[in-house]
Image (spheres, rainbow, N blue to C red):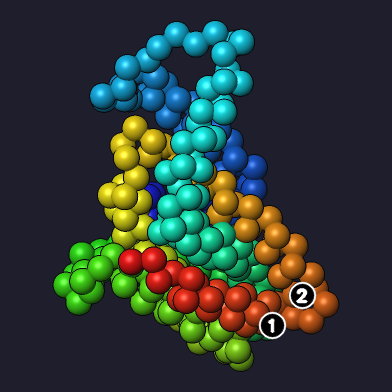
Amino acid sequence: MVTGAAMLVGTVSGGLLGSVDLALPYVVRAGMLVVVFIVAVMVMHDLGFTPRALKLAALPREMRAVARSSVAFGWRRRSMRLLMLCSAIQGGFMSWGFYAWQLYFLELLRRDAVWVAGVVAALVSASMIVGNALTDWLTKFCGRRSTLMLWAAGAQTVAAIGVGLAGSFWVAVAFLLVVTGALGVAGPVKQAYMHEIVPSEHRASVISFSSLVGNAGGVGAQKGLGYLARARSIGEGYVVGGVDATPRQAVGRFS
């Protein structure tokens, strides 16, 4: 929720700065990153972590150990393997769909309104905050975390197809907010699920490996959906992307 709020503030303020000069948001962001770096060095410290000396020659051995633990506690566990495959499919569609809506919505609006991107991005941030806030309430109706993730996956699938089929700007925006709101619901649940089933000493490695698999899906999907959008239409890209996300409900029966 804090991340979504920061995105909301950053989107609006960045849009205001960009309306003055497009270079300003980048300059301000660079300055903020310097501040964040200083704060991180001074006050952010790992608790329960004991640093140890590591020579450069031992780095390959350590990397192999991390890879082995990622496979042993991640890929070889059925529940984690299927969750990673789900993440690859979801990440593949969202990495393309999150940026494709900007041009697509302007096409639906039938005019070049610069403000649209900022307003919709702010609404996306707000919808994810709402999804985060609803997670705890929705758990009352789902006995398993995996069940809640499956319902969220179903909502994302239907809404993504709705974005592609919508002939109206406002209808497409509404469906997109359902997609991002469902992401807001599923995100904390997925994190909690992974933290429960992966031993703490291997958790960082497995979570990083899961992120790698998800990003790999994004690499392939952006090529495929991008080509489809150019050859046919962006709307068809959303329909195909939504249909492609449907197997996650079957694959996701990892409870």
Percent across and percent down for residue 157 are 50, 79
In this view, the residue farthest toward the right is 231
Work out which quarter of the rendered image holds the C terminus and state it: bottom left
Q: Is residue 50 above or below residue 152?
A: above
Q: Are marks 2 and 1 in contact (CB under 8 Å)?
A: yes
Category of crowding for the residue at label 1, using alpha-carbon neighbours closer than 10 angstroms: few (below 14), some (14–19), many (at least 20): some
Work out which quarter of the rendered image holds the N terminus and state it: bottom left
Judge left or right: residue 144 versus residue 118: left
Judging by the rendered image, the residue that carries numbered circle 1 is 236
Point out which mark residue 228 bears: 2
Question: First in sequence: mark 2 or mark 1?
Answer: 2
Label 2, secondary structure: give it: helix
Q: Amino acid at mark 1?
A: Glu
Percent across and percent down for residue 64 are 57, 28
**Numbered marks: total:** 2
Percent across and percent down for residue 100 are 65, 68
Percent across and percent down for residue 198 are 34, 45
**Distance between the alpha carbons at the discs numbered 2 and 1:** 7 Å
Identify which residue is drawn at 20% across, 77% down. Answer: 141
